[in-house]
Amino acid sequence: MTTDVQGPERLATIKLIEATNPILRKRARDVGQSARPAAVIAAMREVLAAHQGAGLAAPQIGVDWRVFILADDQQPFVNPVIAERSAETDVQDEGCLSLPGIIVAVRRNLSVTVQAKGRRVQLRGMAARIAQHEIDHLDGVLITDRGVLLPDSGDAPRPEQQEKTI
Ligand SMILES: [Zn+2]
């Protein structure tokens, strides 16, 4: 689907991987001390901007590393863990760049504290939700594992079929 992507030619080789790619279903590896993730993070920013997403995890572009970014945040989260989470939760509809056309109602914590390399950040509301979604990606978890497909998902496959196709 490279024809969707506008912009520099290099975007043709850095793109979202297919929903069926097994990398979306495995736990990503920690980024090592000597690793230099800047190029990967730059590629992630390009893909995120091209798709006008709110967040992106490295496995979504085929990179087996524990890194995610938020569109509204300049710094990446490298080797992130959720250090604290609120007892309060809510349920909101979520989509995923890796699962086009699918909307799932997902229960998430209203606020989380994310500990990552060089930063510890408390996030609330939508930012907290997106961070939990992206950290799920790093653990091979997709929204279809977290909730139920809503009627307005149109012709998206039903949950029992989803299990086999993603
Ligand atoms: Zn996603």
Image: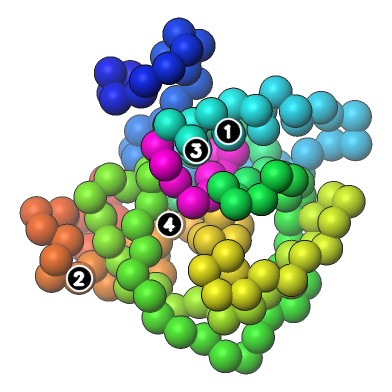
Q: Which residue is mark 3?
A: 48
- Sort mark 1 into few (<14), some (14-19) or many (20+) by Cα contacts within 10 Å: many
Do the CB atoms of the residues marked 3 and 1 lie less than 8 Å apart? Answer: yes
Q: Amino acid at mark 4?
A: Leu
- Report x, y in % for residue 73: 66, 50
Q: Amino acid at mark 1?
A: Met
Indicate which disc, 4 or 1, sits on the residue closer to the N terminus: 1
Q: Which residue is mark 4?
A: 142
Do the CB atoms of the residues marked 2 and 4 lie less than 8 Å apart? Answer: no
Q: CA distance from mark 3 to mark 2?
A: 25 Å
Q: Which residue is mark 1?
A: 44
Residue visible at 49% across and 38% down in the picture: 48
- For the residue with label 3, is its CB less than 8 Å from the closest atom of ligand 1? no
**Pair 3/2: label in front:** 3
Q: CA distance from mark 3 to mark 1?
A: 6 Å
Label placed on residue 85 = none
Q: Quadrant of the N terminus?
A: top left
Indicate which disc, 3 or 2, sits on the residue closer to the N terminus: 3
In-front residue for pair 82/69: 69
- For the residue with label 4, is its CB less than 8 Å from the closest atom of ligand 1? yes
Outermost residue, left side = 155
Q: Which residue is mark 2?
A: 150
Residue visible at 32% across and 47% down in the picture: 99
In the picture provided, is 133 more to the left or to the right than 154?
Answer: right
Q: Amino acid at mark 3?
A: Leu
Secondary element under disc 1, as helix, strand or loop, is helix
Over which residues does the magenta segment extend? 51-59
- Report x, y in % for residue 161: 19, 55
In the picture provided, is 103 more to the left or to the right than 65?
Answer: left
